[in-house]
Image: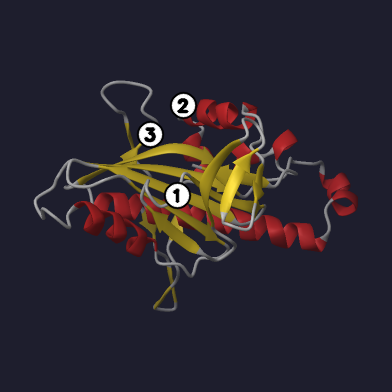
Amino acid sequence: SFFSCKTTKPQEPLYLPKLTSSSSNGQKQQQQPRMTVDECFSHLPCLREASDSLLAQSTQEYNINLNSSINNNNNNKKSKLLYVGQSEVGHCVPLQADVIVSDRATTCHILMLYSVSSGNVPLATCAHLDSTRYNIAELFDAHLQHHQRRNRSTQDIELDIHIVGGYTPEQHQPQQQSSLQGVGDCDATATSRKLTQWIVYELAQQAQRCAEPMTCTLQTALVSQLNTSNHHHHHHHSHH
């Protein structure tokens, strides 16, 4: 379990249903969720509000020069940039980068983690996930180790979670699907949905594992149906 957006006080915990395992001929099969991510998120209007707010923001454009600094075209301000490409993971503290960016999240997902505590300076992480082969636990452990490096008893760690990417295409009538949606689109949709489901459940499991020293809050979930309709054709640029 983890917390939904910090829009109410006290925070309202978000509980995902436990995974159920089925067996056939005495063999265990992969666990399946009782509820889809879309069904779960439909009960959390704050996530939709956060998604709409993010989509309403103007696009930030940056020009990279040879000395690795960047110019923000919106205000002509120079900043230090950390770019995280597909299948990459990046960590940084405020002195190392002003902005973390990633892009081209269609079926891929961009996961951003940002943690603060009394034990150390904030830590930011960006992971561009293109499959389920990643170890989400290692990302959480990196934040725990960072904030408990000086004092192992630090218990006031607050971790904000942001997920962007993936989509669920608008539903068409059966007779329309054959002409509007090809085999490749079906494969991409299934891959995107599977990845979304896996990431959210992995995040919930790690939030529960780290619950004693760290409060985990899902601030943004611009995924699946929240990233659909007029928005799912866009390649998102995530920045912190």
Local crowd at mark 1 within 10 Å, few (<14), some, or many (≥20)? Answer: some
At horizontal 17% and vertical 46% (from top left) the residue drawn is 119
Q: Residue furthest right?
A: 179
Residue 179: x and y, percent? 90, 51
Number of numbered discs on residues: 3
Marks 1 and 3 close (CB-CB < 8 Å): no
Number of the front mark, 1 or 3: 1
Asked if residue 204 shows in the view, the reply is yes
Q: Tag on residue 46?
A: 2
Marks 3 and 2 close (CB-CB < 8 Å): yes
In the rendered structure, which disc, 1 or 2, sits on the residue that comes first in sequence? Answer: 2
Judging depth in this view, the residue of 21 and 70 nearest the camera is: 70
Residue 96: x and y, percent? 40, 52
Q: How is the image coloured?
A: secondary structure
Residue 18: x and y, percent? 35, 51
Q: Amino acid at mark 1?
A: Ala
Q: Amino acid at mark 2?
A: Cys
Q: Amino acid at mark 3?
A: Ser
Residue beneath label 3, please?
A: 4
- Would residue 57 appear left or right of 162 to someone viewing this image? right
SS for callout 3: loop
At horizontal 45% and vertical 49% (from top left) the residue drawn is 97
At horizontal 38% and vertical 23% (from top left) the residue drawn is 7
Question: Mark 1 to mark 2: distance in Å?
Answer: 29 Å
In the rendered structure, which disc, 3 or 2, sits on the residue that comes first in sequence? Answer: 3
Judging depth in this view, the residue of 126 and 120 nearest the camera is: 120
Residue beneath label 1, please?
A: 97
- Would residue 236 appear left or right of 93 to someone viewing this image? right
